[in-house]
Amino acid sequence: MKKTIKNKFIVSVKVGEKGQIIVPKEAREMFNISSGDTLLFLGDKQKGLALVKADAIYDLVDDRK
């Protein structure tokens, strides 16, 4: 299931035998994710999981801006 509404994206992905997932093309385009980019996989047992582009976090903590 894929659904894109304005600036939001929802999709289901399957976990492969090696624990890998594929980031869908539409999500890679929307969030400007390219081969070699670093993604952070965040998890909280109560709240769930999130996948965040590392650059977004680095921008938040960069005090030079």
Image (cartoon, grey):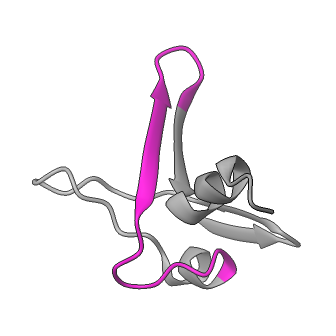
Q: Is residue 60 magenta?
A: no
Q: Residue at x 57, y 64 (%)?
A: 55
Looking at this view, is 26 or 55 the one in front? Answer: 55
Image quadrant containing the C terminus = bottom right
Q: Is residue 47 magenta?
A: yes
Picture coordinates of residue 2, whole percent (x, y):
61, 69
Image-based side of 31 in relation to 50, left or right: right
The segment highlighted magenta reads: 30-48
Q: Residue at x 68, y 79 (%)?
A: 30
Picture coordinates of residue 40, whole percent (x, y):
45, 50
Is residue 25 placed above or below 57 in the rendered structure? below
Quadrant of the rendered structure where residue 37 is? bottom left
Image-based side of 34 in relation to 32, left or right: left
Looking at this view, is 61 or 46 the one in front? Answer: 61
Q: Residue at x 50, y 57 (%)?
A: 12
Farthest left residue in view: 18
Image-based side of 18 in relation to 51, left or right: left
Q: Residue at x 67, y 47 (%)?
A: 61
Farthest top residue in view: 46
Picture coordinates of residue 50, whole percent (x, y):
54, 43
